[in-house]
């Protein structure tokens, strides 16, 4: 059975994605220094070049194609855009490819992507930044087709995870295609992880209210294929729509303290849920 994203998105106002700068990148050796760890603590992010080499990028692209086209046995984690639900059966293979919103839970089935997610190169940086052993707990590929790839509104990733506040979580976002401001690269509120949990509301997505963000300057993360960024689980971030002619595919993995224990949705929503707290948006 085909799966469709829960959210349909929508339009958003000007000024919601307004970068004042682009994040500088460091090489892998520099990422493992005390200075880079301090930068991560202060800003909530670290941009790293060359996480994947050219062969690994090509392998990741081929793996994404195979996952979407049904060539990976037992894999079922393809999520299509909700707006195509009534049209999907009439679409060509190319059209269906562009209707995919995300892929998820592929690591147990796809050894090329598992090698990236579980590899020492990324693991070493995660352990260094968090100063503890970590484990992978989420794997996704996020797709924005040209001329219409949907926005992912501003949010904090911890708001989606049933783990106690204070659990150390680091996200890793890796460009498979070149990621630019025009095609929907990552944007963050620099140092915004220090704000703590922010109320989220069900609007175009499970998101931070636009009025909490609009008018605030962001930092953008243009990345070459194989470059990536590491970010704190409480760092507010989002990606605008892709209205360019260039495709934007990315891998995203989340790691946490290896000793972390889950909580439940009730506790999470008591912290991050705006409606339940009587807040308005």
Image (tube, rainbow, N blue to C red):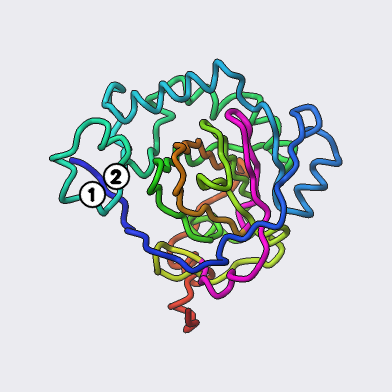
Q: Position of residue 96 (x, y in %)?
A: 25, 37
Q: Nearer the viewer, mark 1 or mark 2?
A: 1
Mark 1 residue crowding within 10 angstroms, few (<14) / some (14–19) / many (20+): some
124 shown above or below 279 = above
Q: Is residue 173 above or below residue 197?
A: above
Q: Is residue 85 above or below residue 176?
A: below
Whether residue 200 appears in magenta in the rendering, the answer is no
Callout 2: SS: strand
Residue extending furthest toward the right: 35
- Give the quadrant of residue 238: bottom right
In the image, the segment drawn in magenta is 208-235
Q: Which mark is residue 221?
A: none
Instruction: Tell me what residue is drawn at x 51 percent, y 32 percent.
Output: 177
User: What is the distance, in whole Å, between disc 1 and disc 2 at their CAs?
Assistant: 7 Å
Outermost residue toward the left? Answer: 90
Residue at point 37%, 25% (across, down): 109
Q: Left or right: 197 with respect to 24? A: left
Q: In which quadrant of the rendered view does residue 211 lie?
A: bottom right
* CB contact under 8 Å: marks 1 and 2: yes
| Quarter of the image that includes the N terminus | top left
- Front residue of 14/78: it is 14
Give the residue at x 42% y 40%.
143
The residue to which callout 2 is attached is 80
The residue furthest top is 55
Q: Position of residue 126 (x, y in %)?
A: 67, 37
Q: Nearer the viewer, residue 82 or 115?
A: 82
Nearest the eye: 212 or 129: 212
Q: x and y percent of residue 162 in the render?
A: 48, 56
Residue where numbered disc 1 is placed:
84
């Amino acid at each position: 059975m085909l799966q469709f994203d829960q959210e349909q998105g929508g339009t958003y106002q000007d000024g919601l994605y307004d970068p004042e700068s682009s994040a500088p990148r460091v090489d892998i050796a520099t990422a493992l220094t005390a200075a880079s760890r301090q930068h991560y603590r202060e800003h909530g992010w670290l941009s790293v070049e060359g996480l994947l080499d050219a062969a690994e990028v090509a392998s990741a692209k081929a793996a994404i194609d195979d996952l979407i086209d049904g060539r990976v046995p037992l894999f079922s984690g393809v999520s299509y855009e909700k707006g195509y639900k009534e049209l999907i059966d009439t679409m060509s293979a190319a059209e269906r490819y562009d209707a995919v919103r995300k892929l998820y839970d592929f690591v147990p089935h796809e050894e090329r992507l598992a090698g990236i997610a579980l590899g020492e190169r990324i693991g070493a940086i995660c352990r260094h930044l968090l100063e503890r052993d970590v484990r992978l707990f989420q794997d996704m590929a996020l797709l924005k087709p040209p001329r219409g790839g949907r926005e992912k509104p501003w949010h904090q990733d911890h708001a989606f995870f049933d783990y106690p506040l204070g659990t150390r979580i680091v996200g890793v976002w890796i460009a498979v295609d070149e990621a630019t401001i025009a095609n929907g690269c990552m944007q963050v509120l620099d140092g915004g992880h220090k704000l703590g949990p922010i109320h989220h509301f069900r609007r175009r997505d499970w998101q931070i209210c636009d009025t909490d963000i609009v008018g605030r300057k962001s930092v953008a993360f243009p990345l070459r294929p194989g470059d990536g960024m590491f970010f704190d689980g409480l760092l507010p971030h989002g990606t605008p729509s892709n209205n360019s002619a260039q495709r934007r595919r990315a891998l995203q993995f989340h790691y946490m303290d290896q000793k972390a224990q889950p909580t439940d949705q009730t506790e999470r929503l008591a912290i991050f849920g705006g409606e339940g707290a009587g807040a308005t948006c």
